Amino acid sequence: VSFGYQDVAPAEKTQRVGDVFRNVASRYDLMNDAMSGGMHRLWKDRFVSRVKPRAGEQILDMAGGTGDIAFRLARSGASITVADINPAMLEVGMDRAQQRGLDGLVWTEANAETLSFPDRFFDAYTIAFGIRNVTDIPAALREAHRVLRRGGRFFCLEFSTVTWPGFKDVYDAYSHRLVPKLGKLLADDEDSYRYLIESIRRFPNMPAFRQMIADAGFAQTRVEPIMGGLVAIHSGWKI
Ligand code: SAM
């Protein structure tokens, strides 16, 4: 499997992704704002508006990290479980929840590839900027399908492939030259940000990823590109 520019054994990718997020955890929120010019907030708002959470629902926010999606989902009154493989990210998220007086969320350490939740437990599954870091993506999609009830919905927010020609050049230059520099300047961590950018470049394009979601058993799969495919919302239903 690929880790940044290199090919590595699957176990090594999992380990190195762990290092990346342990390194960036304390600066993660600041860096998101810096790198996206604050736009990640709008993408996340749009994403959650597509999920349409409702009071009483059970929603799993996988790779939930520091809670950005979970806090938005929680406003609906739905019950939110935040799962992430990285305890350092969860720790920052739990602190933020406490500061906001949000005590109803469940925080749990889990690998998206092998979940311990029972079959058909959740009404919705969300994963934002998480799936491309997972080593075995088909396994994670199958687990998402397994833990959803019939009629449950799957939503994924992820960087994708920019298709607007002029914008693509600007974006490539920005991401490959500037992002690692920003990572060095703001977080003293050029390598982690180099990995993050390279993992975006290697991620399957929209039709390919949509097919992977269908292959995991989801029906009525959809993709909604945002900003020419810079990011995309993929969704599907378990029927
Ligand atoms: N969802 C949050 C957001 O949108 O701000 C966090 C996204 S962050 C870029 C990616 C997260 O994926 C990290 O917190 C990382 O620990 C988590 N992650 C990576 N591999 C994972 C896996 N196999 N299972 C669960 N979480 C994973």
Image (spheres, rainbow, N blue to C red):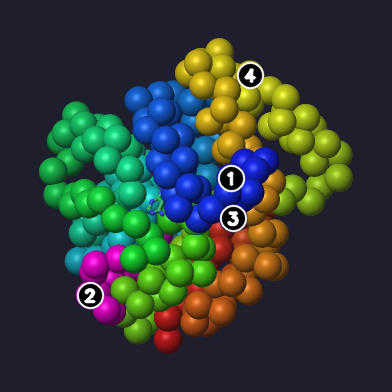
Q: Which residues are magenta?
A: 115-126
| 72 is within the stretch colored magenta | no
Q: Looking at the picture, tell me which residue is in the foreground, 205 or 14.
A: 14
Answer whether labels 4 and 1 touch (C-beta < 8 Å): no
Q: Earlier in the sequence, mark 3 or mark 2?
A: 3
Q: Looking at the picture, tell me which residue is in the foreground, 18 or 230.
A: 18
> What is the residue that sits farthest to the top in this orientation?
185
Identify which residue is drawn at 57% across, 27% down. Answer: 191
Q: Position of residue 217 (x, y in %)?
A: 49, 82
Answer whether labels 4 and 2 touch (C-beta < 8 Å): no
Alpha carbon distance from label 1 to label 3: 7 Å
Answer whether labels 4 and 3 touch (C-beta < 8 Å): no
Q: Position of residue 101 (x, y in %)?
A: 15, 35
Q: Is residue 40 above or below residue 52?
A: above
Answer whether labels 3 and 2 touch (C-beta < 8 Å): no
> Disc 4 marks which amino acid?
Lys
Q: Earlier in the sequence, mark 4 or mark 1?
A: 1
Horizontal side of 120 relative to 183 (left or right) equals: left
Answer whether residue 100 is visible to the viewer in this image.
no
> Disc 1 marks which amino acid?
Phe
**Which residue is labeled 2 in the image?**
118
Q: Earlier in the sequence, mark 2 or mark 1?
A: 1
Q: Dot 2, how many residues are within 10 Å of its Cα: few (below 14), some (14-19), or many (20+)?
A: few
Tag of residue 3: 1
Q: Secondary structure at mark 3?
A: loop
Alpha carbon distance from label 4 to label 2: 44 Å
